[in-house]
Image (cartoon, helix red, strand yellow):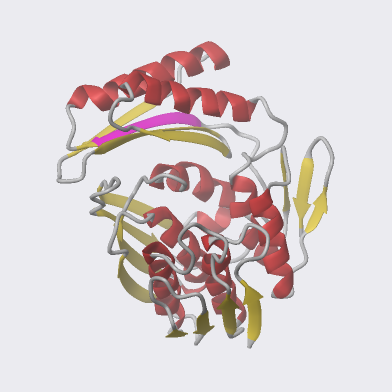
């Protein structure tokens, strides 16, 4: 049984989700202790438990102590298989983070996952970032990944529903494509149509000024009890997003999104600061290389965790940070 200190370095849910995924893909039983020990609300949250259940479904894993508030968790993986999994976070917890834990396992044999929770919530990538930035950055391994957003879910109501279907892929080295595809997706649920439109309009104007070209815009509007909005923009393997909230003008949401992407595009490296750690589990499994502008705390945590499972990530620090395996 591999022991993992859940309070080490970044000490958050990332260690829980990635440990479960790595346990499944390597066949290594794992016990995680001191989970989120230094956080305001220590222990497992609903979203972490949901992510672990999704991974367990994909590999017929056995769980102990996988309940909200638990400070420890044991995960004993079985054989990875093609499965149809359904997971309800039970709150507005992040659907994208559940998918992130499940996807490396699902790519081995294929399968599907339906998740209910929050499609866009604070301190998490939006589901649009996954679809438009993470998946394309994976290249061939993600060529058979399709994502369908059935309902948008925002904090605090949640209720978003996303279905992901995966066909197994032969591993190929992670290499960031040189072609740069840009876009904006502005979304809302339970709000007047002008909210998503104003978000998109402001983001498009600023990005056009900065890049010297028009950026394709997609607007998605949903009905439902969950009220909220989001705006996500991307160029290649760099992205940015912002969430609407009461008192924040819709145009400001679009502006924050655009300025975030402009800032990332002005930094060296092929991927943005958030993508740099999200790709590491695939880099460890498939090999390859990519660069980023900084060696973030999350990336350092992932490199440490991967080493515990026997994966060596080479990191070259400097003005540009290089990751390779």
Q: How many marks?
A: 0
The kind of secondary structure the magenta stretch mainly shows is: strand
Residue in front for this viewpoint, 122 or 240: 122
* Residue 202, position as x, y percentages in the image: 39, 17
Judging depth in this view, the residue of 320 and 208 nearest the camera is: 320
Report which quarter residue 69 is drawn in.
Answer: bottom left
Q: Residue at x 58, y 82 (%)?
A: 31
Q: Nearer the viewer, residue 310 or 124?
A: 124
| Residue 209 horizontal side relative to residue 243, left or right | right
Residue 261 to residue 5: above or below:
above
Q: Position of residue 313 (x, y in %)?
A: 76, 61
Query: Would residue 212 be visible to someone looking at this image?
Result: no
| Magenta part of the chain | 182-188
Q: Quadrant of residue 319?
A: top right
Rendered image quadrant of residue 180: top right
Quadrant containing the N terminus is bottom right
The quadrant in which the C terminus is found is bottom right
Q: Residue at x 31, y 62 (%)?
A: 115
25 relative to 300 in the view: left or right: left
In the image, residue 158 lies in the stretch drawn in magenta = no
Left or right: where 189 falls relative to 292: left
**Which residue is drawn at the image coordinates 48% and 24% (left, top)?**
258
Residue 314 makes an appearance in the image = yes
At 45% from the left and 75% from the top, the residue drawn is 70
| Residue 201 x/y as whole percent | 35, 17
The answer to whether residue 186 is magenta is yes
Q: Position of residue 92 (x, y in %)?
A: 31, 54
Height in image: 302 above or below 30?
A: above
């Amino acid at each position: 049984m591999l022991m993992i200190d859940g309070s080490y370095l970044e000490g958050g849910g990332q260690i829980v989700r990635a440990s479960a995924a790595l346990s499944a893909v390597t066949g290594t039983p794992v016990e995680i202790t001191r989970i989120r020990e230094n956080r305001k609300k220590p222990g497992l949250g609903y979203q972490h438990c949901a992510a672990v259940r999704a991974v367990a479904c994909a590999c017929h894993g056995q769980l102990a102590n996988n309940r909200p508030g638990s400070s420890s968790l044991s995960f004993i993986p079985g054989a990875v298989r093609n499965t149809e999994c359904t997971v309800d976070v039970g709150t507005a917890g992040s659907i994208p983070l559940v998918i992130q834990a499940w996807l490396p396992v699902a790519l081995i044999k294929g399968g599907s996952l339906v998740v209910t929770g929050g499609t866009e919530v604070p301190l998490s990538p939006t589901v649009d970032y996954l679809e438009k930035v993470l998946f394309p950055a994976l290249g061939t391994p993600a060529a058979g990944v399709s994502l369908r957003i059935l309902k948008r879910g925002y904090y605090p109501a949640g209720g978003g529903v996303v279905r992901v279907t995966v066909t197994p892929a032969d591993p190929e080295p992670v290499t960031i494509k040189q072609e740069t595809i840009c876009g904006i997706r502005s979304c809302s649920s339970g709000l007047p149509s002008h909210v998503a439109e104003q978000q998109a309009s402001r983001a498009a104007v600023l990005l056009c000024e900065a890049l010297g070209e028009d950026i394709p815009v997609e607007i998605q509007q949903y009905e439902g009890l969950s009220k909220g909005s989001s705006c996500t923009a991307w160029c290649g393997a760099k992205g940015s997003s912002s969430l609407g909230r009461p008192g924040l003008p819709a145009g400001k949401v679009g502006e924050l999104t655009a300025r975030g992407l402009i800032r990332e595009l002005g930094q060296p490296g092929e991927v943005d600061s958030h993508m740099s750690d999200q790709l590491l589990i695939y880099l460890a499994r498939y090999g390859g290389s990519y660069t980023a502008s900084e060696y973030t705390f999350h990336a350092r945590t992932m490199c440490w965790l991967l080493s515990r499972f026997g994966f060596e990530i080479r990191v070259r620090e400097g003005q540009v940070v290089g990751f390779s395996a």
